[in-house]
Image (spheres, helix red, strand yellow):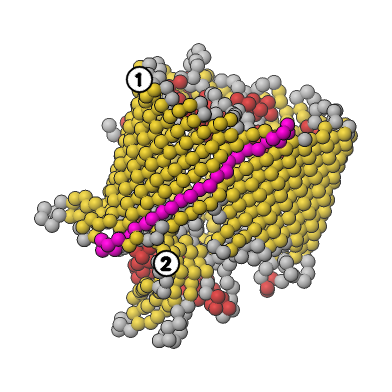
Amino acid sequence: MAALTLRVAFLAGLVAAAGCNYFRPTEPETPTNPPLRTNYGHPDSSLQSMNVGLADKSTQGSGAYITALAESISTSTPAFHQLFWPEDVVTWSGLVPGDWNASFEQRLYSYLIGLRPLDTYKLIWSDGRTTDNIDFIGGFAQIERRYRVVTYNSDGDSTILALGFADLTFYQDALDRWVITLWVDKSDDDPDVPDRLTLGKRRLQAQSE
Amino acid sequence: MNRCQRLALLLVPIVLGAISAALPGRAQTPSSSRFAFADTTLLRDTLGISFTDLFELADSLRLTPDTLRALSVRYRFPPVRMVHLADSLGIPVDSVGVVLERERFNPLARTGDENVTAMLYTTNYNVQQTQSSWGNNLDFNLERGPLFLRNLTLISIDRYSSGAIDTRRKTRNANTEAGWRLNQDMSLGARAIVEVFDSDDPSSGVITDKSNDFQFSGRSRQAPTRNLSTELNMFAGILDQTGSQVEKFGMTGEANARMLYRRGAWFSNELRGTFSGNAARTRLPGAPEHQRTHDYNQLATANLQLYPNSPVGLIANAKYRDGRVETPSAVPQDSGRTRLALSSGLDGSLDIRMRRTADRYLNLTSNFGTTDAGSASYTGQTERFNRVLGTDGRYDLLGWVLEGRFSNGFNRTESPRVTVDGGYIEEVENRNLDGKLNRRLTPKLNLQLNGGISLALYRYTVVDSYPSPPVSRDNYRQSYRVDVLYNYSTRFNTGAGLEVARTQLVNIAATSTSANNITRTYRADWRWTYRLTTGLTATQRNTLSANYLAYTFREGQDRLNLEYGNVTTLNAVLSPRLVLNLTHSSSLAPSGSYLQDDVDGEWFFSPSDRSQVFELRSDLSYTPTPGFSLTLAPLYRSVEREGTVNGVTAPQRQDRTLTVDGGAVVSLPVAQRGRLEGNFGRRFQGQRTATYTAGVAEIAPVTEQDFWRGALTFSWQL
């Protein structure tokens, strides 16, 4: 018994000796880029944060973009899912993922910023065609928004990479962030745009790359 | 006091616990001061079950009191009875219900030779606003000499309403076994397991899944020596599955065995093993051809106990599992081929327990496990490894009770193919240390101190070219809490607490450190209970909290959230049949950010948002006769939210909600063998909302909900 006590006391001593730095967090690296100004305190703020994230075209920007989507491991909100516009699925010859979740959405981000790497990116959100349904007390919102992913080259010429409408369902998570749990993608019949690719179609292209 | 000294203080209980294991000492009764701060609402009688000694039993079993209470309510056994059953069966207390359910289908568990005809029919109906369920269960048992027949049938119909769409799910299961008990240790028979599931969920389409298993069964048990007992059960038959996922037809079988060796009270060793598998012709629904597939699952467990009730004991557990599932490929170019999903795992634990009394012990614990989870697709496979080393102890000295707990856990998860591009490896290390100190300062005054510190380190390594791995980071937390409880008399007691916590998020890489932050939390509460007269008791709880959020690398983004809360309850027993509870609660929560003064450059708090919630609720219960109560619960709730726009505070939204819930609670015998239990009632809710735009209110029409709700169960026993 005495030997056992000595071992236990030795173990406790080891822990105490190691304790000086045992619970000290690692020193982080100094930020290389200016911090992104993001805000997830309102559904529209979350959408603008996605724009900030896409415009940044970096790991930090990817994080800002993805933060606006509900996490699959969160217990406070449902997980993020995206539903394709049926016509996009019909006209697509490749594999269509059964469930487009946040993990797939990260691939969309990488795919989009790789399309025109030298250009400046913008994800422009504007009002939809239906009335917003936002319950601030219950932390639930259903809104429709029109989106356009536009790039600008050094001469200022713009290219529309994607456009469409999205029926968006938001929940307020445990950190009071408004995050998207459901994105129902819809096409935009804008006659001024010759190649009307939705983000849903871009998603299908992204997963086949 | 530097960091090392503070940590050394937290290690005091561990060192004292180690000393207690070596020094001679006399037996002591558990100190009741440890339970002075326990939640006494858990002791309320429920469903006729008494929860006396709940805290002491839960403490000795190393369970939380609410877990032991939930197990007792679920299986309708008082905690003392649960512990007695666990001891007599030689199993953990949370396995009692599972083992009792399993043994009901074991004909060798029968002890007498008398004829038995037993039947229990239960029907339950549960209705809520958008869903309802109706269940019918039949449990039939017939025994005539060596012959036996058992049947368990479960039928449930669930209905969900969403707008104009109704969805129905029907589940029907029947498990029937008939046989002949050759002697007390052997039986032969046959069993049929039939399962049918129907769903018309629009999101997944109409689904009908059927599964029929018809098997011969053989059960046996042996006792070669007084200390050794064994069991061997075998099942073999045919499998027939049709449905939306896969169609399968073939042979199926299962063999399971158990061996228990006990030597006095100082040694016990139990080994269990199960192997099940099938060889079938399988195809996807609608596919023209079948493929031959082989599936199996095997599970082996071992438990070793050495001197479990002695001052020093050892308990070791191990579990190995392995399995494979073969399915036809759904990819057109793989037509005619099958895909394999392989999975396996090994878990183990080793505990060394040194115990003199309930208040003087030290445990050394270790766990490890490895899991290889396969997938039938190219992506999704994961391999996990984890280990945890820890110790916990308790020591009482001169009226002080010290508790300490330390653990270090490591997890490694390899997900090389999250997508076709690659994946990542996650390594997580959790370091935890916490301690608690209790003391009855005077016969009326109790003190409790809590402290803890933890650090979680997350590290990620990219495999191939996976574009977006999680961010490597550290999560740090330290906290302490002081609680005092003053029992002035049986009529009046009061208590107060103060908690201080600091949490820190540290992203390592420069590209993500802008989110790094530190949150300092201060929380205080004061509560009192006063019995004004016989049958009239008032209780109040007041809370104050503040969360200071500071970003390490972001200037001007810091935030402050404050909250003041108050709950007052008046409990009145107006007569033995009439009880009234009246509760008023309020919450005021301003929050905002910090602005920099243009003149002196100082930062100051600028409130930007404020919410107020007030609630008044009463619960009235009238019991005209035992087993039947009428209830009425009106609730009024007011929520107001204000925001600051351009420095001007303006209302943003107001909600007023009135809910009235009235109904009855029944627990009545019906004739001699029936029983009706449950509750039913009607709920009405009205809500009016006003939203403000530029200070002008837009009042939405009143929304109302009015629906029946309830859950009733009728059971009849032959």
Q: Quadrant of the N terminus of chain B?
A: top left
Q: Which residue is mark 1?
A: B488
Residue B686 painted magenta: yes
Q: Is residue A116 left or right of residue A185?
A: left
What is the quadrant of residue B406 in the picture?
A: top left
Instruction: Bin the neighbour count of mark 2 within 10 Å (Cα to Cα): few under 14, some 14-19, many 20 and up.
Output: some
Q: Which mark is residue A27?
A: none
Task: Determine which quarter of the picture holds residue B617.
Answer: top left
Which stretch is magenta? B670-697
Q: Residue at x 36, y 78 (%)?
A: A151
User: Does the image show residue A12?
Assistant: no
- What residue lies at 38% left-to-right and 31% top-to-bottom? B539
* Chief SS of the magenta region: strand
Seen from the viewer's position, the closer of residues A179 and B39 is: B39
Which residue is more in the foreground, B299 or A183? Answer: A183
Q: Which mark is residue A143?
A: 2
Mark 2 is on which residue type? Ile
User: Mark 1 to mark 2: distance in Å?
Assistant: 57 Å
Residue B696 position within the rendered picture, expressed as x and y whole percent measured from the top left:
27, 62
**Chain letter for the residue marked with disc 1 in the picture:** B
Position in image of residue B65 (x %, y %) = 52, 31
Q: In the figure, B9 relative to B27: above or below?
A: below
Q: Residue B480 sits in which quadrant? A: top left
Position of A133 with respect to B278 (left or right) is left
Instruction: Kindly state the secondary structure of the residue where label 1 is placed.
Output: loop
Q: Is residue A196 visible?
A: yes
Task: Kindly give the residue lying farthest to the top in the view shown.
Answer: B26
Question: Which residue occupies 40% across, 16% down?
Answer: B398
